[in-house]
């Protein structure tokens, strides 16, 4: 569990940066060289490579070097842990909201019942 949590922390940390999210979005349309990925960003290549390294460490990106060109591709399996976490959170919060809704409905019924005069009260007033 601790290892899975650590991997999840790495994925969320990697995706916390807008540059890295942009890289991931670009790789959704297919593999690309580091040069192609770095082109839209106004930063030195060593700085850009730090982003690539973070994405590789998190497991979101795989790269391989052929000659002088490093090609990167997305590794979507790394997102499975995050997807599972989101589904668990969604289930937890939906259950909480369902219980809250039931509680509010119960309160509203109790308030409505308290505001309605009883039949005995109606009879006394009509005499």
Image (cartoon, rainbow, N blue to C red):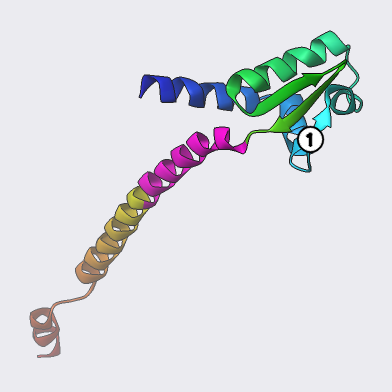
In the shown orientation, is residue 27 left or right of residue 8? right
Query: Which residue is pictured at 14% across the width and 84% down the height?
Result: 122
Query: Which residue is pictured at 33% across the width and 51% down the height?
Result: 95
Vertical arrangement, residue 54 with respect to residue 61, above or below: above
Q: Residue furthest front?
A: 67
Q: Nearer the viewer, residue 64 or 103?
A: 64
Name the image quarter holding residue 88. Answer: top left
On the rendered image, what quadrant is the N terminus found in? top left
Residue 40 x, y percent position in the rendering: 90, 28
Residue 4 x, y percent position in the rendering: 42, 25
Vertical arrangement, residue 25 with respect to residue 106, above or below: above
Residue 15 x, y percent position in the rendering: 64, 28
On the rendered image, what quadrant is the C terminus found in? bottom left
Region in magenta: 76-94
Q: Nearer the viewer, residue 47 or 69?
A: 69
The residue identified by callout 1 is 31
Vertical arrangement, residue 115 with respect to residue 27, above or below: below
Name the image quarter holding residue 84. Answer: top left
Name the image quarter holding residue 62. Answer: top right
Q: Main secondary structure of the magenta part?
A: helix
Q: Residues within 10 Å of mark 1 (few under 14, many from 20)?
A: some
């Amino acid at each position: 569990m601790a290892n899975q949590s650590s991997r999840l922390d790495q994925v969320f940390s990697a995706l916390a940066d807008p540059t890295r999210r942009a890289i991931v979005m670009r790789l959704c349309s297919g593999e690309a060289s580091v040069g192609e990925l770095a082109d839209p960003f106004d930063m030195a290549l060593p700085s850009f490579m730090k982003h690539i390294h973070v994405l590789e460490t998190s497991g979101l990106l795989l790269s391989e070097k052929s000659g002088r060109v490093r090609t990167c591709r997305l590794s979507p399996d790394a997102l499975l842990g995050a997807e599972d976490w989101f589904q668990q959170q969604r289930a937890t919060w939906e259950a909480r909201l369902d219980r809250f809704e039931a509680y509010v409905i119960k309160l509203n019924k109790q308030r409505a019942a308290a505001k309605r005069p009883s039949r005995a009260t109606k009879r006394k007033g009509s005499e």
